[in-house]
Amino acid sequence: MRMGRLGRRRPLALAYHALTDDWPDPLAVRVDRFAAQVRHLQEAGYVGVRLTELARDPGRDGVVAITFDDAFSSVLTEALPVLDELGWPATVYASTGVIDDGQPMLWLLGQRGRPPADERTLMPLSWDDLRLLHARGWEIGSHGTTHRRLSAMGPEERRFEIEHARGRIEAEVGPCTAISYPWGEVVDEVVHAAMDAGHVAGSGLEGRFEHGDPMRVPRFAVSGRDGAFRFAAKSSRTVSSVRHTSVWTGLERLRRRDYEPVGDAARVSPDA
């Protein structure tokens, strides 16, 4: 895959979900395409870092945080070997109730989603898998307890959802400093609750972001529909600049069509 030059190597954060060749869904990126994308970034002068590192030093050029929402099992089997070749760490965000449940994430399909050829594609990582990734230098962040929309909860339920997930990860794996807001939303009351729970880095996928705010790090989701041109555009300085303006709000509808999950929430107990 050939792509144009990225220009100034500004800090960049990318969000992936599943890596697989058997699921025709925007959440799934082909393995060979993922490998080509990250190798292109390396050739362009980027170095991989964890999301918290990027959040703490937003002015540092030439770094990219590769992140994975939902903790699909393919993160271990497909992403780790590719990133190991480059010597890059990454950040994976896990919903703790989903990990405890250990069942295929069929709820992500909703009413319209097309299932993969192999249901195992929808399996989440296990706690042992997450410990292995952590031992390899990866960051394990929170994606909430049950993956429900935090903005739809009352303050006490929201607080429990966030604090319980962070505590569970720290008990099972190690320090948990970063959170990916479920369903990509970046809402003030959710951001403040995440800070109160002890997170120092946060990111979603929607809305405008404040420059230099470690709790609102702008990530771009990489869709299964992203060919070379679209990936280059998402990696460009121009698109990143637009993300901080009112123009971005008008592009939200197009963005949602590409990769927002169609499911509702994980069918797991918040007390798991």
Image (cartoon, rainbow, N blue to C red):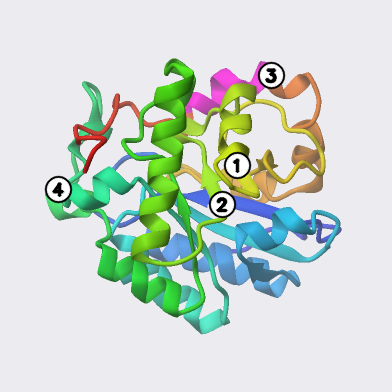
Asked if the stretch drawn in magenta spans residue 252, the answer is: yes
- What span is colored magenta in the figure? 249-257
Give the label on residue 203, or none: 1
Residue 102 placed where, x, y %?
17, 52
Task: Give how far apart the Cα atoms at labels 3 and 4 are.
Answer: 36 Å
Q: Around disc 3, counting alpha carbons within 10 Å, would you say few (fewer than 14), some (14 to 19), or many (20 or more)? A: some
Front of the two marks 2 and 3: 2
Residue drawn 45% across and 79% down? 136
Name which residue type carries label 1: Ser
Name which residue type carries label 3: Thr
Give the label on residue 103, or none: 4
Determine whether label 2 and label 3 are within 8 Å by CB.
Answer: no
- The residue that label 2 is drawn on is 178
Determine whether label 2 and label 1 are within 8 Å by CB.
Answer: yes
Name which of mark 2 and mark 3 comes first in the sequence: 2
Image check: 205 left or right of 208?
A: left
Front of the two marks 4 and 2: 2
Determine whether label 4 and label 2 are within 8 Å by CB.
Answer: no
Task: Give how far apart the Cα atoms at labels 4 and 1 are.
Answer: 26 Å
- The residue that label 3 is drawn on is 249
Give the label on residue 62, or none: none
The image quarter in which residue 45 lies: bottom right
